[in-house]
Each structure stands twice: as C-alpha cells, then as structure tokens.
C-alpha cells in the first residue's frame, strides 16, 4: 500500500485487533477506535509515525501535533527527531577512536546513554549510573571502582537520587566504559536528558522494622519496564519517580513527578483492608511545587502500570516547545489535577480506584538522623551502618574497600540514599565494631554531628557547567567551621545547590543555599549564596523562604553560625529548626538572626 493510500475497512479491523492485543500484553492504552488508530498511524503521511510492527511512535506523533498547532519544537526536540540517541553507537565509537568529544546537540544525545560532557568546567565525561531503589551489590560496586580508576579520575559522587556518578572520563573511553558496565550487569541507559531518572525507593527496604512494604521489587520492576520499552525514552523533559514504603528513613517522594506512598487501610473502609499506595503527582520544588495527592489508591501490583500510564499521558501532552514549562507540573497546571489523572486513564489496563485523601492510617515517623550511624534492623541480631563520605565523594579505593567490608561483614549489600550517603546492611552484632573500625580507617564517617549528617550539596562548578559556585568546597568549609563552634541536639539539613535547577533541593532544607554571583563593586564578582530557611518535606512539607540575598561564599560559614545561634537562643524547649522558622515571619527571623533590621 502506498503511503498516501487509505486503510481499507478490513485492514482497519485487523490493525485494531492486532494493536489491542499487543497493547494488552504491554499494559498500555490504545486508541478508542480503528479510525482513531488509523489517523494516528497515518498522521500526515509520515511513515516514521508507525513502527515496523505497527506500534505508533508516540513521541513523533506528539511532535507533529505540536507543529500542526503552530508550535515551534525546541532544539532538543528537533535533535531527538533528527537522530535517535540510541542509534549512535557507531558515531560514538568513531569519535572515541579519534579522541573527540561530542559537539552541538550530540552533547545532549550522549546523555541518553548517561554520558555527560561537562565542558567547560572539565573537558571530560561524567557517567551517571542506574540502581533501582539505590541498591548495589558489593561485586558491582568493586567493578564501578575499577572503571573509575581505569577510565576516569578515580572520583565517584553519591547523588541526591541514590545514585553514583563517575567523573573525569576521557574522550577515548565512552565505548570502553559502556561495554565494561554492560559486562558488570549494570547500565547507564536513560540516566540523563529527557528520560526517567534513577527510580528511588526506601533505603531500608526489606530491613526496616517500621515499613509497611518492601519497595525493592517495585523499584526493580519499574526499572526494567523503563529499560525495555523504548517508547518511554525521549519524554518532553526529565522525570523522577520514588517509592516510599512507610519506613523510618524518608525518600522525599513528594518532591518527585510521581511519588508512591505506602499506607495501611484498616477494616471497615470502602476497599479491602491491607497495604496500598497513594499516588502523588507534579513535585518540582525548584519551581515551587510539591507533589499533590492524585486521589487514587493502588495495590502494590498496580503501581508500575499506573506510572506507565502517567508517563504515556505526559509523552502525549507535555510541552515540546518551551523547556522551562516541559515538566509534569505544567501539564497539571494547564489541565488541573483531576483532568490530568482522567487523561491518563486511557493508558491504564484497569480503572482508577478513587479514594479520599484521608483514607488510610497516618504514616509512621521519619527519623531524620537514621541514615548515619549504627542501627538495628528488623532481623534480630543484624544492624546496618550509615556512612558519610566527605562532600559525598568517594575515591575508587574507598568504594572498593567498602565493597569488601560489605561482603566480609554483611550480606554484600550497599544501599545509597537521597541524603548522599550509603548504608552497609545485614551486619551481625559481633561484626559491628570491626566493621566500623574498618570503615573509619578509610577516612569515612559513621558517628556524625547533626551538622555533618545533614549537609547536602550538588556537584557544583567543579563539574557542572550550570553551577555558579564550588558547592563541594563550600560544604567542606561549612563542616570544618561549624562543627567546633555550634552544638545542636537534633537533626538539621543544610542544602547547597549551584543553580536554580536545584539538584540539591534547597527549598526543602532547614537551611537552603542557592548559588549566585555577588557584585562587589566595579567589575568584581565573587561566588556567593542566597539564604533560605524553614524548608521541609513529608509531614513537615513547606518551601523554604528567602531571608537574605547575596552572601559571599567566604562569609557564609559565619552567617550560618549566626543563624544557628539565633535559633538556639530564641527557640522553645526542644523545638526543631523547621517548626521554629515557620512560626516566625521573615522580618522576625531577620531580626533574630541579626541579618537585617526587622522593619526592612
């Protein structure tokens, strides 16, 4: 049949049945009728809109719809349209053989494979990995250390998505690195650009005495669903998903595009008793938004299909013209939350189970300091050890030796957290003292002050072209200055982020620091920060408020000391920083902290 010919009625019926069968197996939605399918498939006569097996190219169709409606595709959308990033292996190999970094929009395309050319800050690649639920086994961790030493600078960063990044990879090594990863049984596929980032889950999944459900199988199922469905790549923008199993360590699920929060439903409700997940949508704290409860209740085995339905709706409706407005939050802003959920229903293999927000028992408490130190597990006689690395950066040899300790003293399991640290689990009580001694001998920290335990920092301008400050340097300076001067009796989070993209989530910190350039007069500019206070997530959900602008980086430790001393002097007995900050106005806080007069 020629490209311009109409489908016959017999062909329409055949195609409708074929697609319905395929879609049912994949758990995706289908067009409402054969006519709808044929229109989608034929589009404007573009054969690229339908694949060889008859599956509609949802991304191409969304781009075409944008153009038909008068929109201009962003350069990144044009890049994906002209050359699929997963079809570049030969080009990447040729560039590597020539020791050549990518240029132009190929820099963007490489990110689909987890390779970030971070020039001009470093003329090198950073490689971002994927670990479902943030869990990596000891042999894999040792292999990552080997890759970092062989092909990079030996530095490995722990990220705020419970992930690892290898830095300083040379132009000659992309194929070597990707091949080595594959041989380890690991992947970086879709770890950057317009894709679903590392799926996070409760760090203590399976070992938490408080948890309602072990989220590891769910994270793993969604991870492999993403990896094996090519149509789930190339979204309008990046996408974050998290599972919270109700345990003692939070996962910041309400800051994600999709957050699944476990709840227990008691007998006597409109649904059968048991553990369900509430689905939250649209978290984007860097743009001033927490995820909102979608009003639906999901069985655990329904969550992956629900996430896939939301993703397919986002592929169809997300903005492909303005990158600043291309996240799920803005789909919800345009259509409303209820309509957004309703639009996703066509891609769901079962109907939404609508339920009021208050259905379910209250979530158990989150221990904000339980990601550091030695703590008992649900399994009698076993403990996990929470470990901090300076500025969340490990040397390859440290990771390799940690892997050895995990294998020798525990079950060979390392767990990464969104607080940029790692946990070594399943250590028998008799092994704990030796394990702690071996960890500390590596220059890592097990027993930490509230200040050190709660510091979070993005990559900074030493490794990210968007960052305005060296956040890693500044977080170390804060630690060294504050620890001997200020003694706190409860957890405190200080988040340093190098640009408004807010990878370090400065809006949810007790103290949030957003990088800026400070005008010192004339042509002189120095690195600095805006200071925000009072942020929190979960039960303490609130966005931090800006109380002081443009503090030079070298003045920052003294300013934070003033803030903390003001808090300690003026708080009620036992009052947390979050509660203290949010019962005062900005003017009152400014006066207490001595930053500006209260009347200003």
Image (cartoon, rainbow, N blue to C red):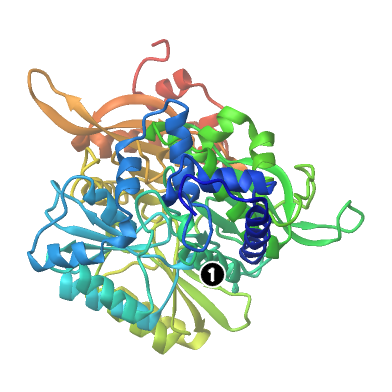
**Residue 378 visible in the displayed image:** yes
Q: Quadrant of residue 216?
A: bottom right
The answer to which of 11 and 548 lies nearer the viewer is 11
The answer to which of 444 and 222 lies nearer the viewer is 222
Task: Tell me: residue 389, above or below residue 59.
Answer: below
Residue tagged by mark 1? 220
Q: Residues within 10 Å of mark 1 (few under 14, many from 20)?
A: some
Q: Residue at x 69, y 46 (%)?
A: 32
Q: Which residue is drawn at 18% across and 74% down?
A: 149
The furthest residue to the top: 599
Task: Tell me: residue 482, above or below residue 64.
Answer: below
Q: Residue at x 30, y 45 (%)?
A: 79
Horizontal relation, residue 550 to residue 408: left or right = left
Q: Residue 593: where, in percent of width, then height?
A: 39, 27
Quadrant of the rendering where the C terminus is positioned: top left
The answer to which of 364 and 56 lies nearer the viewer is 56
Task: Tell me: residue 159, above or below residue 539.
Answer: below
Q: Residue at x 51, y 63 (%)?
A: 53
**Residue 568 visible in the displayed image:** no
Horizontal relation, residue 260 to residue 79: left or right = right
Horizontal relation, residue 3 to residue 594: left or right = right
- Secondary structure under tag 1 reads helix
């Amino acid at each position: 049949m020629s490209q311009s010919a109409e489908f016959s009625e017999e062909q329409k019926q055949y195609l409708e049945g074929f697609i319905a069968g395929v879609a049912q197996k994949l758990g995706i939605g289908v067009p409402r009728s054969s006519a709808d399918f044929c229109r989608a498939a034929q589009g404007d006569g573009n054969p690229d809109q339908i694949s060889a097996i008859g599956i509609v190219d949802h991304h191409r169709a969304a781009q075409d719809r944008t153009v038909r409606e008068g929109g201009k595709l962003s350069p990144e959308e044009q890049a994906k349209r002209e050359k699929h990033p997963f079809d570049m292996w030969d080009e990447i190999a040729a560039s590597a053989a020539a020791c050549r970094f990518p240029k132009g929009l190929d820099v963007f395309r490489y990110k689909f494979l987890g390779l970030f050319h971070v020039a001009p800050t470093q003329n090198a690649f950073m490689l971002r990995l994927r670990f479902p639920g943030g869990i990596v086994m000891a042999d894999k961790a040792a292999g990552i250390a080997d890759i970092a030493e062989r092909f990079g600078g030996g530095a490995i960063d722990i990220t705020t998505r419970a992930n690892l990044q290898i830095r300083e990879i040379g132009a000659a090594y992309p194929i070597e690195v990707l091949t080595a990863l594959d041989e380890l049984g690991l992947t970086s596929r879709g770890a950057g650009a317009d894709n679903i980032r590392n799926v996070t889950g409760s760090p203590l999944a399976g070992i938490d005495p408080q948890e309602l459900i072990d989220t590891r199988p769910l994270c793993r199922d969604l991870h492999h669903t993403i990896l094996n469905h090519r149509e789930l790549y190339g979204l309008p923008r990046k996408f974050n998903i998290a599972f919270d199993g109700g345990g003692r360590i939070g996962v910041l699920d309400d800051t994600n595009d999709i957050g699944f929060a476990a709840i227990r439903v008691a007998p006597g409700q409109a649904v059968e008793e048991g553990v369900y997940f509430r689905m939250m949508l649209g978290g984007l704290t860097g743009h001033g938004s927490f995820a909102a409860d979608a009003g639906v209740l999901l069985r655990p085995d329904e969550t992956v299909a629900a996430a896939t339905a939301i993703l397919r709706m986002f592929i169809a409706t997300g903005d492909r013209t303005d990158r600043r407005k291309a996240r799920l939050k803005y789909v919800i802003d345009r259509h409303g939350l209820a309509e957004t959920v309703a639009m996703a229903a066509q891609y769901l293999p079962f109907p939404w189970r609508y339920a009021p927000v208050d259905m379910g028992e209250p979530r158990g408490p989150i221990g904000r300091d339980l990601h550091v130190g030695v703590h008992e597990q649900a399994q009698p006689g076993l403990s996990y050890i929470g470990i901090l690395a300076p500025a969340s950066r490990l040397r390859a040899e440290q990771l390799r030796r940690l892997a050895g300790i995990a294998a020798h003293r525990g079950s060979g399991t390392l767990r990464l957290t969104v607080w940029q640290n790692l946990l070594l689990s399943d250590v028998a009580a008799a092994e704990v003292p030796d394990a702690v001694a071996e960890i500390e001998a590596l220059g890592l920290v097990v027993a930490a002050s509230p200040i050190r335990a709660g510091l979070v920092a993005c990559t900074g301008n030493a490794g990210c072209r968007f960052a305005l400050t060296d956040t890693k340097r500044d977080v170390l300076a804060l630690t060294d200055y504050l620890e001997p001067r200020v003694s706190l009796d409860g957890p405190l989070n200080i988040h340093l982020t190098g640009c408004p993209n807010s990878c370090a989530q400065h809006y949810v910190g007790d103290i949030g620091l957003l990088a800026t350039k400070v005008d010192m007069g004339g042509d002189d500019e120095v690195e600095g920060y805006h200071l925000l206070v009072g942020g929190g997530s979960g039960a303490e959900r609130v966005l931090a408020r800006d109380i002081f602008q443009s503090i030079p980086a070298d003045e920052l430790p003294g300013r934070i000391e003033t803030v903390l001393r003001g808090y300690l002097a003026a708080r009620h007995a036992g009052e947390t920083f979050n509660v203290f900050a949010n019962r005062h106005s900005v003017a009152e806080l400014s006066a207490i902290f001595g930053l500006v007069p209260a009347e200003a």
